[in-house]
Image (cartoon, grey):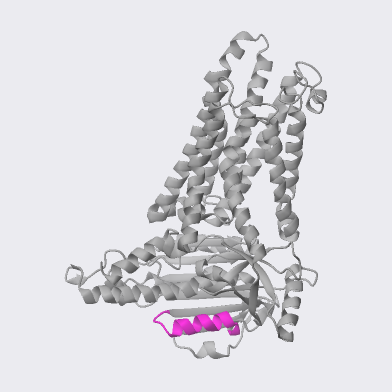
Amino acid sequence: MSSTASNRGAAATAAFGGPAAYGVLGSALLALSICVYPAAWLFSHFIVQTKVPCFSDVCDDNKGSNQQKTRNMLVAFNTLLLFTAAVALAARLLTPVRRVLSLRVVGTHSTVTLGEVAWSILAGFVAIFVCSAANWNLIYPSEFNGKSEFTQSLMDFLMVLTGDSLGVLLGLVMLPVSKYSAVNDFLGLPYTSTVRVHIWISYLAFWTLLSHIAFALSERSFTGNALVIIFNLKGSKPGWGHETYLYIAGDVAFFAFVFVLLTSQKFVRRRFYNAFYFSHFMVIVVLLFAYLHAAITIHYSIPGIALWTIDGILRLASRFKGNAVLNLEKEPGGFRTMTIATARGAVCRPGHFVRICVPAVSIAEYHPLSVVRATPESVTVMFAPDKESQWTARMTKHLEERLAAGGKAPLVQVQGPFGSVSRLASDPAVHSVVAYVAGTGAAPGFSILRAAVEQRQRAVDDAAEFLAAGDAKKDGKPVSADVGAGVQLRRGGPRLYLFWAGAGAGLELASEVVDLARAVAASDATLTLHVFDTSEPGSERSVSVAGEVAELPGVEVHASRARPHLLALLNRHVREPAAASVDGERAAPIGIFICGPDRFIEDSLASVSKFQRENRGMPVELEVESYGL
């Protein structure tokens, strides 16, 4: 095998989260995570088939016809997961599938995609309707034929149905919880999409829970005071295991679920992150008392619980490892870049983030920070110190004082990396990459653009070797089977665009901008940089630029004191170069990465939609990261 083929194989392995991407331990984690699913299924079948001890007040999963009901529901649940995995892999391998699933379907201002909506509807359908179809002929026909009170029979059926469906929904809610998700990485599931469907399914579970309570109250009202029954100990027989504590356990699970839902609201997430984060551990209470309420609810949460346990062990391990802060640099606009010595940099990819704890500031608080750059020995993150009372400001003050004093470097704890790997940097078909970012949203933008330059250099080296070897020809011209080596060499380097808005002047002097510009100047890529100082609204004007970046070859620099408008920037800088063909080849897709606050995202998406309408022959690959998630 030639070295070129070996490089291609390594790149393919890395793209799918194999050893080239994660090393031996990462590959072992992936294998373990995949094995969790069939192992959980087999474990549930073992529980259902054998008379193992049951600690629930209602052991309804392994008695009589309930055994077949549980098995049917497990088949439906796991079939949904297998179908999801198959579609995700198809989207990763086939660009047309990915583009269809990535279609935005809720207006021009929204990032909600067809894939997210379709999967959520399918998950709800499976949880509610498929489970009810599996149960109907097994349990309920005699009730409707033999009872004179049809309404009571119907309420009883709906009460059990919503309870069973709630168990499936809780299982689906648990799956995206694990941030160390090797499976999600392998399948290429976008991090924002998994978070969004996690939120949607949580709300569906809440309304299903309310329906379950309503149907239970209606059914019990036929036999007495429903509220007395629901909130008091009243079983068919005294003692545990005879429905004596059925309702008390359900009440605890309900109020714990409501507490988690309330502390998950956007207002709490954005302003009281730690309250949001730590309140999620109440999910343990929800699952425990849901199981004590009825045993059947736990089967579908077993995979999520197992993955969450693995995730917790890996996070806990970070508590025993201190990482030295090598550098903390103050950037224009008040931003900071911090470099930390850690081997986790070896597995960081463009688009990843890490969670940082500074024990000297707060031993309990971990905060997510986007990765700007990574080497096998270090990770560099970017952040903006907030108000003096906030964690970022206290962390900045502590680290600056420690570094200024000299001596032993301050230590932090690092978890991760988490998040989705950007496709824009590694897709050789994308020749123009736009990073339209605000504030610290520039951090992933820098890593994506820098990786695009590195990817280009690898492609050029690979193409040159391929052509030199004369491996294949078409119409007298050498071509590559996977990338198009001749086109790679003829089209020139990638066109990179960084449009960065921040509340401060001189953003073009930031260290990461300078580093990116130097990398571009040393390659055959080009970079168009336009920075926007938004600190003085209403005073819109161009300003002069200075410094090394303005003098580097292949780099075009603009600076304005104004708010940016993506559509104008795309039409001014991107449209004509991207439309140019190379020796008759189709125009390459434009990769657009957007990161910033919600309003910034909404306006950007409207611009992208209008740009696509006006330039229908120009494909766009879009990636969005929102502060709102």
Dominant SS in magenta: helix
Residue 363 is situated, as x and y percent measured from the top left of the image, at: 74, 64
Asked whether residue 368 is in view, the answer is no
Residue 268 is situated, as x and y percent measured from the top left of the image, at: 74, 55
Residue 358 is situated, as x and y percent measured from the top left of the image, at: 71, 69
Q: How many marks?
A: 0
Instruction: Name the side, left or right, on which 246 lies relative to 12.
Output: right
Please report the bounds of the magenta region as a residue range: 509-525
Residue 529 is situated, as x and y percent measured from the top left of the image, at: 52, 79
Relative to 428, does residue 326 appear above or below in the rendering?
below
Quarter residue 320 falls in? bottom right
Say which residue appears at 78% left-offset and 26% top-offset. Answer: 230
Say which residue appears at 49% left-offset and 73% top-offset. Answer: 449
Q: Quick one: quadrant of the C terminus?
A: bottom right
- Given residues 153 and 305, the one toward you in this image is 305
Quarter residue 247 falls in? top right
Question: Residue furthest toward the left?
Answer: 476
Is 153 inside the magenta-drawn segment? Answer: no
Instruction: Name the side, left or right, on which 230 lies relative to 551.
Output: right
Asked whether residue 519 is in view, the answer is yes
- Given residues 44 and 80, the one toward you in this image is 44
- Given residues 102 and 249, the one toward you in this image is 249
Q: Quick one: quadrant of the N terminus?
A: bottom left
Say which residue appears at 76% left-offset and 66% top-offset. Answer: 362
- Given residues 275 and 65, the one toward you in this image is 65
Is 510 inside the magenta-drawn segment? Answer: yes
Say which residue appears at 52% left-offset and 50% top-offset. Answer: 105
Relative to 295, does residue 358 appear above or below in the rendering?
below
